[in-house]
Image (cartoon, grey):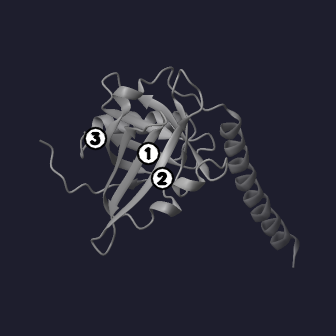
Amino acid sequence: MNNKQKTKSWLKKLTLLSVILGAGVWATAHAQKPMPTIAQVDLGKYLGVWYEIARKPMYFQKQCVKNVQAVYTLNVNGNVSVENSCVNQDGHIEQAQGEAYVVNAPHNSKLRVSFLPESLRWLPVGRGDYWILKLDANYQTVLVGEPKRKYMWVLSREPHLSDEVLQEYLKYAQSLGYRTNDLIYTVQAQKNN
């Protein structure tokens, strides 16, 4: 290998190292910033049906191809019952039952959700973060995420959301350090009333 080839090879390695380090610095800078949530959530207003508009890819929703929604109700323990549903590729409805626990009362903007069988939900394992990051005053659109910025959802009370509002929520997610280039935009077959 001559000097010119060695220099070219060295420059390629340096460029690759710079890209890797740059990505690492970006991720570290955003991962170290605390994830802000909204100041206060009225759980009574938050309960009900929410339609998924967009989400970050996640293994436990990989079977969902359309009509993704969540229904939140208050249970006898004072926690939030969660019923997630979607339609899979075969046209069958998939459902998951869970329970959400508020971890920052009285603010109610940080919850932990468990989809373990009901008899095992008392265990402090298998719970995922569900943080309310942005919510409009009328409780019609919400951005939900978690502190590691791995998962994120945009939900709406209606099956469809205007592009203007969606872009507002996605820009806010980006300002928190979320990458949105891999979002899955949910197909909702329901029509607005």
Say which quarter of the image contains residue 161. Answer: top left
Residue 141 in view, yes or no? yes
In what element is the residue under mark 1?
strand
Q: Amino acid at mark 3?
A: Asp
Depicted 158 relative to depicted 34: above or below: below
Q: CA distance from mark 3 to mark 1?
A: 15 Å
Labels 3 and 1: the sequence-earlier one:
1
Say which quarter of the image contains residue 88. Answer: bottom left
Q: Residue at x 30, y 75 (%)?
A: 90
Q: Residue at x 51, y 27 (%)?
A: 108
Labels 2 and 3: the sequence-earlier one:
2
Report which residue position mark 1 lands on. Answer: 153
Depicted 162 relative to depicted 59: above or below: above
Q: Amino acid at mark 1?
A: Trp
Label 1 with label 2: CB-CB less than 8 Å: yes
Depicted 125 relative to depicted 177: above or below: below
Report which residue position mark 3 lands on. Answer: 163
Q: Position of residue 188 (x, y in %)?
A: 25, 54
Tag 2: Cα neighbours inside 10 Å, few (<14), some, or many (≥20)? many
Say which quarter of the image contains residue 3. Answer: bottom right
